[in-house]
Image: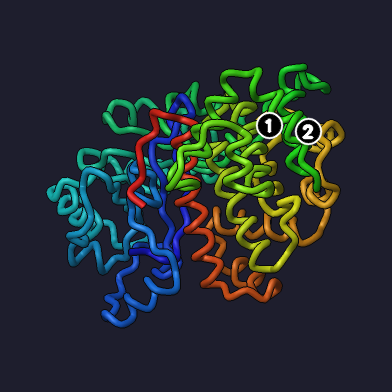
C-alpha cells in the first residue's frame, strides 16, 4: 500500500514498544497520503518498489497517524481499522471550533484520538472528554509548566505521551512525573558508564563479532563457542531456520548452516547472534533498530558494489548502537573489538562510504526526506530505490525479531 514511509517508536514505561508513529513522504507534511492513484500508477509502484501495509510497517502494533485536514473533514479512509490506528490531531490543522467538531466525528467512528503537540493551554480542556491520548513536546514546554498541568491531565483520564525524549535522564524525569508513553531515541543512548572493561561473558560474544569481521572464518572456534552455550545454539537455529532467511531446509547445526548459507551470510548471523545476546537487559526495540540498519546498510553496500567479505555494510549498521547496548563509550568499545578497520573508522565518527550509509539510515528513521534525496545524489542511487531498500529492511527486521523474541507477533509481510 505504502512505498515511501518512515516510523518512530513510542515506548511504554517498561521501554517496550506500544506503537509507532508513521510518517509518509508522499503526503503533505508527513501526513497519510490523500492522493487517489490510478490503477496503472499502483501497478507501477508495486512492481518497482516494495510496498508495505500498516501491519508490516508497525509490526502489528498501533499506528499513530497524522491526516490532512481535507481527509479529517471528509471522513477517514474506510480501509483503516479503528482498533489499530490512533488519529493525531493538532491545532495547526484547523480552527479551534472546527477541530473540535472533527474530534467528535472521529471519536464517534471508533478511532482512538491523540492530541498532538499539546501546549498545556487550558483552552484545550473542552477537548479532553473526546481525547484518549495527549502528546506533550517536552522540548517546547518547561518542566515546571508540565508538572503544574499534570493533576488536570491525570484527572481527565487520558494517557500521556512525552515527545522528544532523547536522553535517559529525560526518560527518568518524565517517568517519575507520571507519563505513560515516551517518544524519542532515549533508548538508543548509553546510560551512565560504569566500567571500562567488558566482563568475560561479554568478551566471548565480542570475539564472535570479531570473527564475523574477518576475511577468514574460523569455523572451529565459532563452533566451539556456540556448542558450549545452549542459549547461543538455540538462538542460532532459530535464526537460520527463520522463513525470512531459509524457506526450504531444516538446518540442524552450525556446519550444516555454513554449507547451506555460505560463509558471508553466516558471518552476518554470527554477528547478529552475538549482538542479540549482548542486548539481554535492553529494550528489544534497540536490537530491532540495529537489525533494520544492518539490512539497509547491507543493501546499500551491494547497490554501490562494495565488497561483501567481510560484510562491512551489514556490520556497520548492526554495531551502530553498540555503545547504547553496552552502556560504554563507542571509542572505548572499538579498542576491545577486533573488527574491520573500515567499520571501526565509520563507527568512531570518521567519514567514509560506510558512515554515509549510517547517516542515510538515520535520515530515514527521522523522515528527513531532503537529506535522503541529497545522499541519494551523492551515492548515485535513485532515491525511490532507497525507499524500497529501507522498506525491505523493515520487513526483514520484523521477521528476524521473532527469532529473538518468541512472544513478538508475526508480521503479515
Q: Which of the two residues, 222 or 175, is positioned nearer the viewer here?
A: 222
Q: Which of the two residues, 170 or 128, is positioned nearer the viewer here?
A: 170
Q: How is the image coloured?
A: rainbow
Look at 72% across and 18% down and name the residue there: 201
Look at 75% across and 30% down and name the residue there: 220
Write down the residue under mark 2. Answer: 329
Residues packed near mark 2 inside 10 Å, few (<14), some (14 to 19) or many (20 plus): some
Look at 77% across and 17% down and name the residue there: 200
Say if mark 1 contacts mark 2, CB within 8 Å: yes
Kindly identify which numbered label has been placed on residue 354. Answer: none
Task: Check disc 2 and report its element: helix, strand or loop.
Answer: loop
Q: Is residue 19 left or right of residue 371?
A: left
User: Where is residue 67 drawn, in percent x and y?
Assistant: 32, 61
From mark 1 to mark 2, how far is it between C-alphas? 8 Å
Look at 64% across and 68% down and name the residue there: 303
Residue 343 lies, with reference to residue 35, above or below; the image says: above
Question: Can residue 169 be spotted in the picture?
Answer: no
Write down the residue under mark 1. Answer: 190
User: Where is residue 166 drawn, in percent x and y?
Assistant: 59, 39
> Disc 1 or 2, which lies upstream in sequence?
1
Looking at the rendered image, the quarter that the N terminus falls into is: bottom left
Question: Can residue 298 be spotted in the picture?
Answer: yes
Classify residue 258 by image quadrant. top right
User: Where is residue 12 drawn, in percent x and y?
Assistant: 43, 30
Amino acid at each position: 500500500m505504502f512505498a515511501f514511509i518512515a516510523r518512530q517508536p513510542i515506548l511504554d514505561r517498561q521501554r517496550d514498544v506500544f506503537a509507532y508513529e508513521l510518517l509518509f513522504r508522499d503526503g503533505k507534511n508527513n501526513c497519510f497520503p490523500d492522493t487517489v492513484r490510478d490503477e496503472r500508477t499502483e501497478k507501477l509502484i508495486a512492481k518497482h518498489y516494495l510496498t508495505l501495509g500498516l501491519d508490516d510497517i508497525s509490526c502489528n502494533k498501533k499506528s499513530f497517524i497524522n491526516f490532512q485536514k481535507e481527509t479529517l473533514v471528509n471522513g477517514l479512509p474506510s480501509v483503516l481499522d479503528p482498533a489499530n490506528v490512533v488519529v493525531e490531531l493538532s491545532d495547526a490543522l484547523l480552527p479551534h471550533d472546527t477541530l473540535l467538531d472533527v474530534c467528535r466525528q472521529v471519536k464517534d467512528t471508533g478511532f482512538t484520538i491523540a492530541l498532538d503537540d499539546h501546549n498545556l493551554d487550558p483552552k484545550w480542556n473542552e477537548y479532553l472528554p473526546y481525547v484518549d491520548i495527549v502528546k506533550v513536546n517536552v522540548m517546547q514546554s518547561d518542566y515546571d509548566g508540565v508538572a503544574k498541568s499534570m493533576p488536570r491531565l491525570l484527572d481527565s483520564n487520558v494517557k500521556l505521551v512525552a515527545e522528544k525524549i532523547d536522553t535517559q535522564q529525560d526518560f527518568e524525569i518524565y517517568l517519575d512525573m507520571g507519563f505513560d508513553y515516551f517518544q524519542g531515541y532515549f533508548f538508543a543512548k548509553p546510560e551512565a558508564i560504569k566500567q571500562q572493561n567488558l566482563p568475560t561473558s561479554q568478551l566471548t560474544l565480542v570475539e564472535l563479532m570479531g570473527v564475523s569481521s574477518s576475511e577468514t572464518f574460523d569455523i572451529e572456534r565459532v563452533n566451539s563457542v556456540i556448542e558450549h552455550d545452549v542459549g547461543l545454539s538455540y538462538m542460532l537455529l532459530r535464526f537460520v531456520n527463520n522463513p525470512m532467511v531459509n524457506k526450504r531446509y531444516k538446518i540442524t547445526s552450525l556446519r550444516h548452516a555454513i554449507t547451506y548459507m555460505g560463509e558471508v551470510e553466516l558471518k552476518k548471523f554470527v554477528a547478529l547472534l552475538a549482538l542479540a545476546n549482548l542486548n539481554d537487559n535492553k529494550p528489544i526495540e534497540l536490537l530491532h533498530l540495529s537489525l533494520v540498519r544492518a539490512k539497509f546498510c547491507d543493501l546499500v553496500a551491494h547497490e554501490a558494489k562494495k565488497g561483501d567479505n567481510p560484510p562491512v555494510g551489514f556490520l556497520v549498521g548492526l554495531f551502530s548502537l553498540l555503545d547504547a547496548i553496552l552502556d560504554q563509550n563507542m571509542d572505548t568499545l572499538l579498542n576491545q573489538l577486533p573488527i574491520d578497520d573500515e567499520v571501526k573508522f565509520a563507527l568512531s565518527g570518521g567519514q567514509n562510504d560506510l558512515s554515509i550509509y549510517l547517516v542515510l539510515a538515520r535520515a530515514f528513521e527521522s523522515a528527513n526526506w531532503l537529506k535522503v534525496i541529497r545522499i541519494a545524489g551523492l551515492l548515485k542511487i535513485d532515491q525511490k530505490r532507497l525507499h524500497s531498500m529501507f522498506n525491505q529492511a523493515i520487513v526483514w527486521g520484523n521477521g528476524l525479531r521473532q527469532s529473538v523474541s518468541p512472544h513478538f507477533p508475526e508480521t503479515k509481510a
